[in-house]
Image: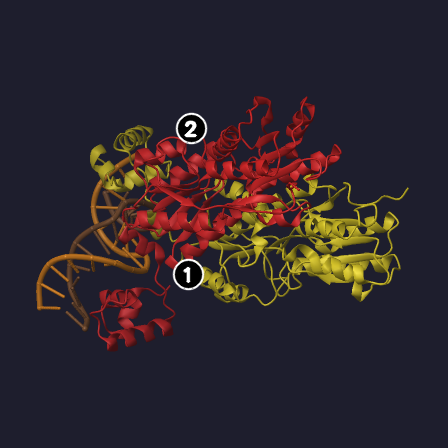
Chain colours: A yellow, B red, C orange, D brown
DNA sequence: CTGTTAGCGCTTTCAA
DNA sequence: TTGAAAGCGCTAACAG
C-alpha cells in the first residue's frame, strides 16, 4: 500500500506537505503541488479515509435507519425515494450513507448504538416516526445529531424533523372529496402508531367538521401496513349500515390493495366509491384507476433531511426545528367528480 | 471522550490488557476481565471503530451499489427486499452496509472509486448487472472482492455472482402458458441491456421452440423499466395483425402497467389475454388480477450475496462462482387455464 | 512556503 | 497473565 510517506519520499518533501496538497492548501506553491500530484498519480496513491477519519474525528458518514424490516413496509417505494433524495445531496457533499435495516426494534437499536457509540457516523437520519421509540430517547440522551423524516410526537420543538404538513394534507384531500359532493367519507389508515397516520386522520376529521359532517367512529379504520392488502378494512366498510361514498386512504400502497378488494366485492372506483390517498409513488399513476393523491415530494423530503443533518454535523445552527415540505394534490381518476 | 487509556488508568492495568478484554482474549484472568468490564461500564467506554479499523486494516463494511437512480427503477421493491436480506445476514456478522445510490453511471463510479481506493469498504455488492459496466472492470482490475446479484455477461467463470436460473425460469413460465393452451405468446422485457431481461427472454424462446411454436421477432418487445408503464409495448402489441393470447413480462412491476394499459384498450386479463411475470413482489398478490409469477426469492438472493462477500473478505475460498437460488412459480389469477 | 513533531484510539508483537 | 512500545496512515499545531 502506498501511503503519504511514500509520496513524501518520492518527491523529497515532508508528509505534511503532501497532506496539504491533498487538502489543496493555499499556501503550497503551485510548483510543489504539481510535483506531488504527479507522484501521487505515478505511484497510484489514494488517501486512506479511515486514517483521516481517525484524526479529524469525523467520518462524513450518516446512519440512515429504516423501519423494522420484519413487516413488508420496506417494500414501500417511499423509502427508496427518500434514499434517492438523501443520496443525491450526500454525493455532492461527499457524505456517505450507512444503512440500517433491522428486522426488529431490538436489532435496529443495537445497530444504532454501535454506529453512535463506536463513533462510526456523524449523525443519524430516522426514516420514520413512531410512538415511544427508544432510539429517539437514546439519541436525545446522548445529544447526538439526528433528524427525523416525519414528525416526532414528543419534543416537537427540540427535535429537528423534515415533514409535510400532514394535517393540512389530510384536510385538503378530504375537502376535495367534499367539494365533489361526497358526504359519507371513510378513513383507512396504516399502523395506528405511526405519526403520519395520526396526522392525516386528524386533517380528515377537521375537514369533515368544517363541512358540518359528523365524524363517525366506525368510519375510521386501521390496517396493518401492507398486511393482507387492506382486506379487513374493506370488509369492515362493507358491513356498515350506511356505506361510504368515498375513502381517504393514508398511503398509496394501501390504496392498491383496497381497490382490489373493493373490486372483488363488486364495487368500482370511482363509479361506486371514490378514493384518494397520499404519497404519489410511481404506482399511483400506472394502476387503474390512476390515483388521485397528495404528492408529498418524497425526494425533496430526502434532500432536505440530508441538508439538515449535514448542517448539524457542521455545527451550524438550524433556524427551525420543523422543516415543512409543501404538498399538492395530483388529480387523477380515482375520485368521482361533481357534475 | 473516554478511551482505552482511561480504562487502563482506572483499573491500574495497561491499555493492551484492556484491548484484550475487549477481544475477550482467553489468556486474561477472569478477575481482571471483571474489573476492566466494570470500569468500562462505569466510565461509559465504547471502542472507537475507526481507530480499530485503522489498525486491523479492515472496516467490516460493504459497499452496496444500487442501479443509477435517475430512472425510477429504484422504486422497484426488488431492491428493498434484497437489501433486507443482506442486512439480516450482515447484522448477525456485525457487518455494515454503505449504500451508494448514484443518479448517473458517473456518480456511481465515483462513489465506488472513493469507497474502494479510500479503503472504506472491504468489499462490494452490485445489485444489478449491466452490459459494459465500467465499475466491474474497475473492480476486476483492482482485484477487489465483489459479488454481483444477477449474472455478469462477461467473465462468468471469474466473477462471483448470486443469481436465479433465469433462463430456466423463463422457460418454465412460458411452458406453463403453453400447457394451458396458449400459442401466440409475446414477451415484454425491461431495459434490453439488463442481463436478467436477456436471460428470461432466452428461456421464453427456448420454450417456444420446444413446443414447435415459431419465435416471432415482432412478438418480443422492450420497454424502459418503469417508464410510461409499458404503454408503447402494449400499443405495439395491439397493432399486431395476429394478436397474442398471452404475454410473458420480465418484471412484476412492468406487469402492473401493462395490465392497466390493456384494460384501457378494453382487454381483460386473463379473459382476453393471459399474463405471467417474474419476481413475486408484494404487489403481485394484491393487485387485480393477482399475478401468476415466478418467485425468485429475492430475500434469499440478498442473504446469499451477503454470505458470499463476507466469505471473500475473510479470504475463504468459495467453492463456486455461480450461486443459484431456486425459483418456483406462484400460480394466481393472471393466466387463463385450459378447461 | 515547508518541515518537525505529536498524536487520533486502537491492536499487536515482543518481552517479562 | 500482563506490560511496554511500536505503529496503522493521516492531520495539525508550531516553528522556521
Please say whether residue A248 is visible from this viewpoint. yes
- Residue furthest to the front in view is B339
- Residue at disc 1, secondary structure: helix
Horizontal arrangement in the rendering, residue A284 relative to residue B319 (left or right): right
Q: Which residue is mark 1?
A: A114
Q: Which residue is mark 2?
A: B132
Dot 2 alpha-carbon crowd within 10 angstroms: few under 14, some 14 to 19, many 20 or more = few
Q: Residue A3: image x %, image y %?
A: 26, 41
Between B328 and B53, the one lying in front of the other is B328
For disc 1, the chain is: A
Dot 1 alpha-carbon crowd within 10 angstroms: few under 14, some 14 to 19, many 20 or more = some
Please state, as top left, top right, bottom left or bottom right, where the C terminus of chain A lies in the image.
top right
Q: Residue B189: image x %, image y %?
A: 56, 32
Please state, as top left, top right, bottom left or bottom right, where the N terminus of chain A lies in the image.
top left
Residue at 70 percent across and 57 percent down: it is: A231
- Residue at disc 2, secondary structure: loop
Amino acid at each position: 500500500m502506498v501511503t503519504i510517506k511514500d509520496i513524501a519520499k518520492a518527491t523529497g518533501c515532508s508528509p505534511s506537505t503532501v497532506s496539504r496538497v491533498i487538502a489543496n492548501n493555499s499556501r503550497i506553491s503551485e510548483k510543489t503541488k504539481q510535483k506531488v500530484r504527479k507522484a501521487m498519480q505515478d505511484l497510484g496513491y489514494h488517501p486512506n479515509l479511515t486514517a483521516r477519519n481517525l484524526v479529524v474525528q469525523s467520518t462524513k458518514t450518516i446512519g440512515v435507519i429504516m423501519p423494522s424490516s420484519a413487516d413488508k413496509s420496506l417494500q414501500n417505494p417511499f423509502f427508496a425515494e427518500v434514499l434517492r433524495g438523501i443520496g443525491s445531496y450526500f454525493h455532492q457533499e461527499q457524505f456517505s450513507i450507512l444503512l440500517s435495516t433491522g428486522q426488529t426494534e431490538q436489532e435496529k437499536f443495537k445497530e444504532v448504538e454501535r454506529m453512535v457509540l463506536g463513533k462510526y457516523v456523524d449523525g443519524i437520519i430516522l426514516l420514520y416516526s413512531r410512538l415511544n421509540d427508544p432510539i429517539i430517547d437514546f439519541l436525545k440522551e446522548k445529544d447526538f445529531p439526528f433528524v427525523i423524516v416525519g414528525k416526532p410526537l414528543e419534543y416537537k420543538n427540540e427535535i429537528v424533523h423534515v415533514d409535510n404538513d400532514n394535517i393540512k394534507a389530510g384536510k385538503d384531500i378530504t375537502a376535495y372529496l367534499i367539494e365533489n359532493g361526497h358526504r359519507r367519507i371513510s378513513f383507512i389508515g396504516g399502523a395506528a402508531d405511526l405519526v403520519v397516520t395520526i396526522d392525516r386522520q386528524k386533517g380528515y376529521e377537521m375537514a369533515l367538521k368544517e363541512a358540518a359532517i359528523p365524524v363517525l367512529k366506525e368510519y375510521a379504520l386501521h390496517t396493518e401496513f401492507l398486511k393482507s392488502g387492506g382486506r379487513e378494512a374493506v370488509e369492515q366498510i362493507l358491513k356498515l349500515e350506511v356505506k361510504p361514498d368515498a375513502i381517504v386512504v393514508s398511503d398509496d400502497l394501501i390504496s392498491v390493495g383496497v381497490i382490489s378488494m373493493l373490486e372483488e366485492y363488486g364495487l368500482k372506483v370511482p363509479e361506486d366509491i371514490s378514493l384518494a390517498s397520499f404519497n404519489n409513488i410511481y404506482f399511483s399513476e400506472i394502476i387503474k384507476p390512476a390515483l388521485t393523491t397528495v404528492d408529498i415530494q418524497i425526494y425533496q423530503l430526502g434532500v432536505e433531511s440530508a441538508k439538515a443533518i449535514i448542517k448539524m454535523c457542521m455545527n451550524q445552527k438550524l433556524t427551525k426545528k420543523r422543516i415543512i415540505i409543501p404538498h399538492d394534490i395530483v388529480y387523477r381518476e380515482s375520485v368521482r367528480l361533481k357534475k
